[in-house]
């Protein structure tokens, strides 16, 4: 398939620049990947769409304040976006400067010396000096790493709203945005209905915003992300299956972690790295239903959703959402998708 197959025209004013006033106030577009049927609803309707026997799988990663502003030895400004915390004093980061800092040079951030050790592909390996750990430095001096399509500076509000209410494990540099719609009241309503929840961790990397540059999507190589599937989550999936329930992934990150850990047909607990690239024709092993936000044109996330529900269905749903003025991307509205029949999907006309 070609990259242009996943394109659509999106008016800029539909890209949400701020979150809704309160969590859970978003709209919800449902899509049945088998019939293609669409329905306009509210996120508040979610408990009506999930049966008590279903299992909701959440990604409990916590967004770190991964963006730092500093100066090189020469005095030039440099922006650091930490991609991955390696250990207490080391991290991989993207560096943006008029001239890239060389290995052995130092960057000063609020009086803290950060040494550039070596280049690793598009990233630099950094050593954080002083008594404070990488996470402590980020928490004290970092800024919320808002996506590039949010064209404003981060605010104190973003520290709270660009984070799920169930975030626990620090390490993501982008939020698992489908989870941003949940508040404690919604989680309580689901529990009252008897819906079970389980957690996993996938630390979303900066690569989630990297464009696909290959005209043929099969030539694209995904960035790698760390994940962990607890044993209790594997047991919860098995229990839901045994009772006839469906597995509902909250977000593409939860879906990628589950499908990565089940490539041999059986979901396995443990830690791992995934560079799984899901495109139309992919055979899903675990997930039956997906809650997700709307995604960028030509993006790997749009390709994943097209694999789940059918490219024709998804592009038609996106046209519907644009016509009805849904809000797009991280702070936007949501979709609830029933998995399609699978197999290769024909290009939309």
Image: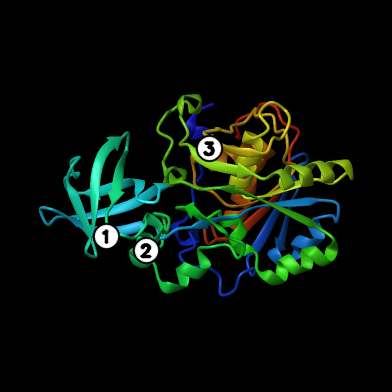
- Residue 157 on image: x %, y %: 46, 73
Cα separation between marks 2 and 1? 9 Å
Q: Residue at x 35, y 57 (%)?
A: 67
Mark sitting earlier along the chain (3/1): 3
In this rendering, would 119 be left or right of 188? left
- Residue 268 on image: x %, y %: 69, 35
Among the 4 quarters of the image, the one containing residue 79? bottom left
Cα separation between marks 3 and 1? 35 Å
- The residue lying furthest to the front in this view is 131
**Given contact means CB atoms under 8 Å apart, are the residues at marks 2 and 1 in contact?**
yes
Q: Which mark is residue 6?
A: 3
Cα separation between marks 2 and 3? 32 Å
Q: Which residue is at the front of the view, 297 or 199?
A: 199
In this rendering, the answer to whether 121 lies above or below 320 is: above
In this rendering, would 56 be left or right of 225? right
- Residue 273 on image: x %, y %: 53, 36
In this rendering, the answer to whether 62 lies above or below 32 is: below
Q: Which residue is mark 2?
A: 143
Q: Residue at x 61, y 58 (%)?
A: 179
- Residue 313 on image: x %, y %: 67, 41
**Given contact means CB atoms under 8 Å apart, are the residues at marks 2 and 3 in contact?**
no
Q: Which residue is at the front of the view, 338 or 285?
A: 285
Under tag 1, what secondary structure?
strand
Mark 3, mark 1: which one is toward the viewer? 1
Q: Which residue is at the front of the view, 24 or 94?
A: 94
Q: Which residue is mark 1?
A: 69
């Amino acid at each position: 398939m070609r990259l242009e197959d996943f394109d659509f025209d999106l008016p800029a004013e539909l890209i949400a620049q701020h979150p809704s006033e309160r969590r859970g106030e978003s709209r919800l577009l449902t899509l049945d990947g088998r019939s293609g049927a669409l329905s306009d609803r509210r996120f508040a309707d979610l408990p009506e769409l999930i049966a008590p026997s279903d299992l909701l799988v959440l990604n409990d990663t916590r967004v770190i304040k991964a963006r730092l502003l500093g100066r090189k030895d020469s005095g030039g400004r440099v922006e650091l976006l930490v991609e991955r915390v390696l250990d207490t004093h080391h991290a991989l980061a993207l560096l943006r400067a008029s001239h890239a800092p060389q290995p052995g040079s130092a960057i000063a951030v609020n009086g803290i010396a950060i040494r550039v050790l070596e280049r690793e592909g598009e990233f630099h390996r950094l050593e954080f000096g002083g008594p404070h750990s990488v996470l402590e430095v980020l928490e004290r001096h970092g800024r919320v790493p808002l996506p590039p399509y949010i064209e404003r500076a981060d605010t104190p509000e973003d520290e709270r709203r660009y984070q799920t209410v169930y975030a626990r494990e620090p390490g993501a540099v982008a939020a698992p945005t489908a989870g941003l719609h949940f508040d404690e009241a919604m989680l309580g309503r689901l529990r009252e209905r008897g819906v079970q929840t389980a957690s996993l961790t996938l630390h979303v990397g900066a690569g989630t915003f990297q464009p696909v540059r290959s005209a043929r999507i099969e030539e694209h190589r995904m960035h790698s992300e760390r994940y962990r599937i607890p044993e209790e989550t594997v047991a919860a999936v098995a229990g839901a299956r045994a009772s006839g329930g469906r597995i509902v992934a909250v977000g593409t990150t939860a879906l990628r972690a589950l499908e990565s850990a089940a490539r041999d047909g059986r979901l396995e607990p443990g830690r791992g790295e995934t560079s799984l690239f899901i495109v139309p024709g992919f055979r899903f092993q675990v997930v039956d239903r997906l809650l997700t936000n709307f995604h960028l044109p030509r993006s790997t996330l749009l390709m994943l959703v097209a694999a789940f529900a059918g490219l024709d269905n998804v592009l038609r749903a996106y046209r519907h959402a644009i016509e009805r003025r849904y809000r797009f991307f991280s702070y936007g509205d949501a979709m609830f998708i029933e998995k399609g029949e699978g197999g290769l999907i024909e290009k939309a006309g």
